[in-house]
């Protein structure tokens, strides 16, 4: 995708894959002006995926966007996207329990929110593990808003490469059935 991002509408509906400087790989979709979907392919909670996460999405200035949310796990996330420069700056605030028991979160969150909330109440929240990192965007696709095919299955080895190589979505940005 080669477009210049200027407005919030340019950002909404965009599908990203990016790799943090620490090696963690994330896939993230600006589903609409208040919702994000994502899959985690590398790092401490690799294998986790989420649909319809409520988020605050704003344009700070032309082509620069801030997205922030709190997960049912108690994890707080703040991302700054600079797509024209191919960069993301993210800060993730993991509760102590996620740092100590990341395996609890490695699932399709939407079907296990009760488990996340129970763990949040059972285990220690503080001190939080704060992970501030820069990332390089390795893929951008114009999926359109509210496209449920973008994040529609659990992460698997090689999925980001399938997307980057054009083997995952058809010309209309719908998932190619395997």
Image: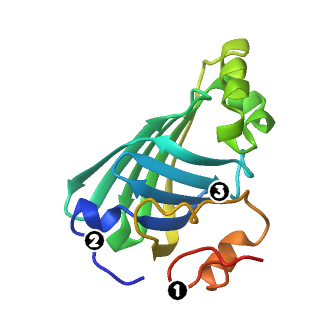
17 on left or right of 43: left
Q: Residues within 10 Å of mark 3 (few under 14, many from 20)?
A: some
Work out which quarter of the rendered image holds the C terminus and state it: bottom right
User: Which residue in the protein does label 3 denote?
Assistant: 24
Secondary structure type for disc 1: loop
C-alpha separation, residue under disc 3 versus residue under disc 1: 28 Å
Q: Nearer the viewer, mark 2 or mark 1?
A: 1
Question: Left or right: 56 with respect to 98?
Answer: left
Q: Which mark is residue 136?
A: none
Is disc 2 in contact with disc 1, using a CB cutoff of under 8 Å?
A: no
Do tag 3 and tag 1 residues touch (Cβ < 8 Å)?
no
User: In the visual, does 75 lie left or right of 178?
Assistant: left
Position in image of residue 51 (x %, y %): 57, 48
**Residue 7: where, in percent of width, then height?**
21, 64
175 or 122, which lies in front? 175
Closer mark to the observer between disc 3 and disc 1 = 1
Is 136 located above or below residue 51 in the figure? below
Q: Residue 171 carries which label?
A: 1
In front here: 14 or 26?
14
Quadrant housing the N terminus: bottom left
Q: How crowded is mark 2: few (under 14 residues within 10 Å), some or many (20 or more)?
A: some
SS category of the residue bearing label 2: loop
| Dot 3 or dot 1, earlier in sequence | 3
> Which residue in the structure is indicated by mark 2?
5
Q: Relative to 8, is 155 on the left or the right?
A: right
């Amino acid at each position: 995708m080669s477009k210049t991002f200027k407005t919030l509408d340019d950002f909404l509906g965009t599908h990203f894959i990016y790799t943090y400087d620490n090696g963690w790989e994330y896939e993230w979709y600006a589903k609409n002006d208040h919702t994000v979907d994502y899959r985690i392919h590398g790092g401490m909670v690799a294998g986790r995926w989420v649909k319809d996460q409520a988020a605050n999405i704003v344009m700070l200035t032309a082509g620069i966007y801030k997205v922030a949310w709190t997960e049912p796990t108690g994890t707080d996330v703040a991302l700054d996207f600079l797509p024209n420069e191919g960069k993301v700056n993210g800060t993730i605030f993991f509760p102590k329990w996620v740092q100590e028991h990341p395996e609890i979160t490695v699932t399709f969150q939407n079907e296990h929110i009760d488990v996340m909330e129970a763990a949040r109440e059972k285990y220690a929240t503080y001190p939080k593990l704060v992970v501030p990192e820069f990332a390089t965007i390795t893929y951008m696709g114009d999926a359109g808003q509210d496209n449920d095919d973008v994040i529609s299955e659990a992460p698997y080895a090689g999925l980001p490469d399938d997307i980057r190589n054009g083997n995952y979505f058809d010309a209309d940005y719908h998932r190619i059935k395997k």
